[in-house]
Amino acid sequence: MRSTPLDAATLEACVAAAVAAPSIHNTQPWRFRLDPEAPAFEVRSAVDRALRHTDPVGRALHLSVGACVFNLRVAAAHFGWSPFVRLLPDPEDPGLLATVRLGGCRSGHATGHRGDLFPALWRRHSSRFPFSARPLPRHALAELADAAHLEGALLGFPAADETARLLRVAGEAEFRNRADGERGVESRRWVHQGPDSPTRTGLPWSALGPQDRRERIPMRDFTAQRHAERLPAQDFETEPVVGLLTTSHDRRTDWLRAGQALEHALLVATVHGLRASLLHQPMEWPDLRRALSPDPDHGGHAQMLIRVGYGPAGPLTPWRDPHAVLDTQVPPR
């Protein structure tokens, strides 16, 4: 497979793929800088999009950026490049989270990823709606776990009793979030009324989904209060399938790897026709995050809860214009 030159159209397509990644509250906290000589992308954090109360240490920001790095890898491979990633390449530049250098092509897919991930990344988005009772194929869940493992993380799908415990922890986190005024103000800032927002970030009302009438699953209430204009509460699935994504360590590089693992698994789920929603609430409270994996030395450090199943797609959330997040000028060293 011959590599496509990094012309303007290919460049825009790669960045558009990157910004289609999931991010906490759809904040899309990333910027890109192209070094056309290498060629290579610098992937930077956009600290003005950080969540001071929800994500004070920036762990979720790193997961978000890791997910966009994975999409960038998939797009580069689709166009025939071999992407080589370095995480936190410059200790003196903490805002530079990754570089993705585009090397010469190799036979087959340059990253070793399956070829159906690129079209899947345009279809992938969270669904905060009830899923059906249709059983999930074991081989599909195994492929999700394999995808996470390829990126240096573990994704396990526990039995019903442990799943119920994890959801109780998530429910406690959601209760705390609703009671925390500062977090409520912060999350409401990222919700807008129309189908699209002027900045193409945040979440439209239609994407918030209903609340779980029986509270089997603690879906996040971004408004931090129940509103009449929200969809009526509904009964969610009685036997939810929830995966716990963990890493062996809990450093910034692990957060970035966890983000890549998350997006790899979500894209594989999309290929299988599965929907997913993310239960991040317990990650936002240190004691509850520890409760998800009480013995990190043996069970790993919890990074995300992923609910998967068959169900409605739900509305798309907006993506930023690639030109708004790309800087093609390379600063002097």
Image: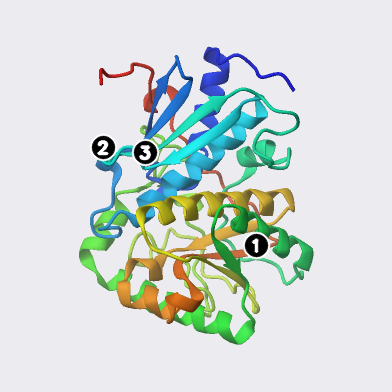
Disc 2: which residue: 93
Q: Nearer the viewer, mark 2 or mark 1?
A: 2
At 23% from the left edge and 54% from the top edge, which residue is drawn?
52
Tell me the tag on residue 145. Answer: 1
Quarter in which the C terminus is drawn: top left
**As drawn, 91 above or below 321:** below
Sequence-first tag of 2 and 1: 2
Q: CA distance from mark 2 to mark 3?
A: 8 Å
Given residues 253 and 202, the one toward you in this image is 253
Sequence-first tag of 1 and 3: 3
Quarter of the view holding residue 289: bottom left
In the rendered structure, the answer to whether residue 188 lies left or right of residue 206 reads left
Visible in this render: residue 107?
yes
Element at badge 1?
Answer: helix
Element at badge 2?
Answer: loop
Q: CA distance from mark 2 to mark 1?
A: 33 Å
Tell me the tag on residue 89. Answer: 3
Residue 156: give x, y in percent of width and height.
60, 70
Quarter in which the N terminus is drawn: top right
Residue 275: give x, y in percent of width and height.
64, 56
